[in-house]
Amino acid sequence: MSSTSLHGISRAIAGFLALAGVAAPACSQQPASRPQPSDAARGDSIVVALQAAPRTLLEPFATLDDELHIGSLIASSLTNLELRDELIHTPGLAHRWEWSPDGKEITYHLRNAKWDDGAPIRASDVVFTYRLIGDERANSVRREYVSRIEKVEALDEKKVKFTFKTAYYRESQLSDAGECILPEHIYGKLDPQQLYGTELALAPVGHGPFRVVEHQGNEAFVLERNEGVTTAGVPYLARAVFLRVGDYEARLRKLLAGEIDAMDGIRPEDLEAIRKRGEFDLYDRGQRFVDFVAWNQKRELFQDIRVRRALTFAIDREGMIAALLTAGGKVYGKQPVGTVPPVLRSAYAGDLMPLPFDPAAAEKLLDEAGWTRPSAGAVRTRNGKPLAFTLLVNDETPRRRQTARMVQQDLKKVGIAVEVDSMRFDVLQKRMEARDYDAAIYGFSASLQMKQGDTWTTGSAFNFGGYSSPKVDAIAAAISSEMDSTRLRVLLKDMQRQIYEDQPYTFLCWFSRFAVVRNRFRNFGANELGFTIALEGCYVPKALQKTFPGR
């Protein structure tokens, strides 16, 4: 079945796709000049599966991967990104920039570019975007990214200057100044709450390789090629449709039936069957993705480091990897020692060994913390209170549901009673953000920036466990003013060692993430930077096109 076939899709979605004509990475996309494959041709459309329902496509306010998959295609930042052991910045909306002699100021020179509605992109739009990100009412998780910026000012219509509170590592400064820019004339008068769930949040005005031309709530989105993009090559594909299919098995069925063309997060056990069909290309997106058990240190139980370390000793992490991330004799995961991903090779603490699976050591630590068994096989108690808590997990990810059961069984063996509470991911996310939980199995795409402050410093946005360490805060402060590349990497490794010593989370696994696309689509290019990161360069040879041929 071609990507235009609608069998098995609901009537509402089917009608939407028909309207769409069913028939790339703005903040991280490649420069406008690109190699042209000999068989590259304009035309055709692609249907891409989403797992979650986006709340916003405004990239500075996006938190879900699926929001970023679309949002990064319809907006641009001052610089684009490449990954070469670390993030390297290349021209985006700014065609050049320079530092002041003291390293505290960057002046950017903007391209002559226009928003989707034809209005010119001005330096004042950059000033507005950073003011909005810093507005508490906007509730942007990227507020930490602007905390090191003293001010942003427009010098003229095409020149904007960032002044930082201190000089620090230059690529990190470029990252902090690298948020996707929003048009002030569109969003300047909106209440910050309108940045989520509204028409302007789900069909933004931007400047990227694609633009939203139609959507059905937050369930389906039609993107059309933007002929006027200046920060990337003009896409070959005429359109890209993003369709939400929440259940993994349903996404896989639709992929195999030809109802969708691309999906992310293929499980290891399904890889071989997909390879054997001979109609798909697989992309290994690397081990940037981490799962962990978060211990909420707002709860008294988890404030004791002996308890947290005991929990890690008691959980068989290698056994989980063997059971859940092994297929065809190949292991697709490894134990983490923190949230600096292995792909940042020179900053990753590869010499730091994970704590072993050691139930005896766990029991010893729990005894020392006063949690003792009243009798053999009984739940531990302290001052008459049982050692028990609730573990949250999301419904949509079988690997995590199985992990929850394995954690429950492992902890039962050392005298800990765990009740597993399974829920939708969006509900779990809200509970995590509100710190309204005991423990939770969670995970994310680890940051590729050479800093970890937004994850681990006291009170930071992604510090879901309420962890607070003066030592880690001091290291983060040193990182925030460090200019030397070698010393910066030493500090990041020191931070990893201190965090792993404290065990604010039990780090379960780095796992390889695989994307799949129908093989008539060439150069799809999913990688560590993103699932749809290279969509502007994706094409279908003319002889294989099914929709919008040659357009």
Image: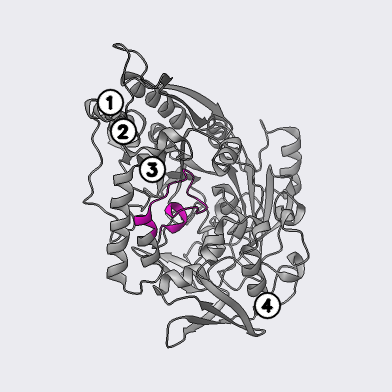
Magenta extent: 452-473
Q: Name the residue under label 2.
A: 317
Q: In this view, does 547 lie to the left or right of 339?
A: right
Dot 3 or dot 2, earlier in sequence: 2
Residue 505, by quadrant, is top left
**Magenta stretch, overall SS:** loop
Real-space CA distance between mark 2 and mark 4, rounded to the nearest whole angstrom: 50 Å
Real-space CA distance between mark 3 and mark 1, rounded to the nearest whole angstrom: 20 Å
Dot 2 or dot 4, earlier in sequence: 4
Q: Name the residue under label 3.
A: 504
* Amino acid of disc 3: Pro
Q: Name the residue under label 1.
A: 367
Residue 122 shows up from this direction? no
Q: Name the residue under label 4.
A: 124
Choose between 539 and 416: the one closer to the eye: 416
Q: In which quarter of the image is the C terminus?
A: bottom right
For label 2, count other residues whose C-alpha is less than 10 Å away and answer few (under 14), some (14-19) or many (20+): many
Dot 3 or dot 1, earlier in sequence: 1
* Amino acid of disc 2: Arg
Real-space CA distance between mark 3 and mark 2, rounded to the nearest whole angstrom: 16 Å
